[in-house]
């Protein structure tokens, strides 16, 4: 289903913070709330990509990868920064969500986010995508 960005934000499509786990085979079990929401919108695949800006990776409906790419590339400070960002973005791939609500995370994403399976992670809904970070990195953060 092709969702327009404004519809995604208005519907609260990707908002929230969820604990999750990446198993020893590198599969992320998506929280039930996320699986149900994706199914409600007819989304059965996610694009997985390291985020060049910080130590995390992004899960996004494939139709919204351009939004993420534009946000990243628009913030690059120089050609070297742009080249590095583009290399990471080009490593992004689509994958199906299996019947148990799991998605395999590529080694490049895990290494970039410094996640060593099996490990607890935090899945943050940020409008048009989900950010996945190591739980330890989220401890003590100030949301104020």
Image (cartoon, rainbow, N blue to C red):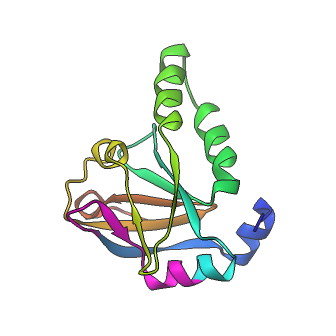
- Count of number-bearing discs: 0
- The image quadrant where one finds the N terminus is bottom right
Q: Which residue is drawn at 65% across and 32% down?
A: 74
Magenta run includes residue 5: no
Image coordinates for residue 15, horizontal then vertical, percent = 57, 72
Image coordinates for residue 41, horizontal then vertical, percent = 69, 77
Q: Going by the image, does 107 lie left or right of 40?
A: left
| Residue 140 visible to an observer of this rendering | no
Residue that lies at the very extreme toward the top in this rendered image: 79
Image coordinates for residue 84, horizontal then vertical, percent = 46, 24
- The image quadrant where one finds the C terminus is bottom left
- In the image, residue 36 above or below residue 3: below
- In the image, residue 46 above or below residue 41: above
The quadrant where residue 3 appears: bottom right
Q: Which residue is drawn at 33% across and 42% down?
A: 112
Q: Going by the image, does 43 lie left or right of 53?
A: right
> Quick one: 129 or 10, which is closer to the camera?
129
Magenta run includes residue 35: yes
- In the image, residue 5 above or below residue 109: below
- In the image, residue 58 above or below residue 88: below
| Residue 82 visible to an observer of this rendering | yes
> Quick one: 50 or 133, which is closer to the camera?
50
Image coordinates for residue 88, horizontal then vertical, percent = 46, 34
Q: Which residue is drawn at 47% across and 37% down?
A: 91
What span is colored magenta in the figure?
22-36
């Amino acid at each position: 289903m092709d969702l327009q960005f404004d519809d995604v934000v208005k519907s609260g499509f990707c908002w929230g913070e969820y604990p999750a786990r990446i198993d020893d085979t590198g599969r992320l079990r998506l929280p039930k709330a996320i699986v149900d929401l994706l199914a409600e919108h007819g989304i059965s695949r996610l694009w997985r990509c390291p985020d060049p800006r910080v130590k995390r990776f992004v899960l996004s409906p494939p139709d919204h990868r351009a939004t993420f790419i534009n946000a990243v590339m628009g913030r690059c400070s120089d050609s070297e920064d742009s080249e590095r960002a583009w290399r990471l973005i080009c490593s992004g791939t689509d994958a199906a969500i299996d019947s148990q609500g799991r998605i395999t995370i590529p080694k490049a994403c895990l290494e970039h986010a410094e996640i060593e399976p099996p490990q607890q992670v935090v899945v943050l809904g940020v409008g048009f995508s989900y950010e996945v970070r190591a739980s330890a990195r989220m401890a003590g953060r100030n949301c104020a």
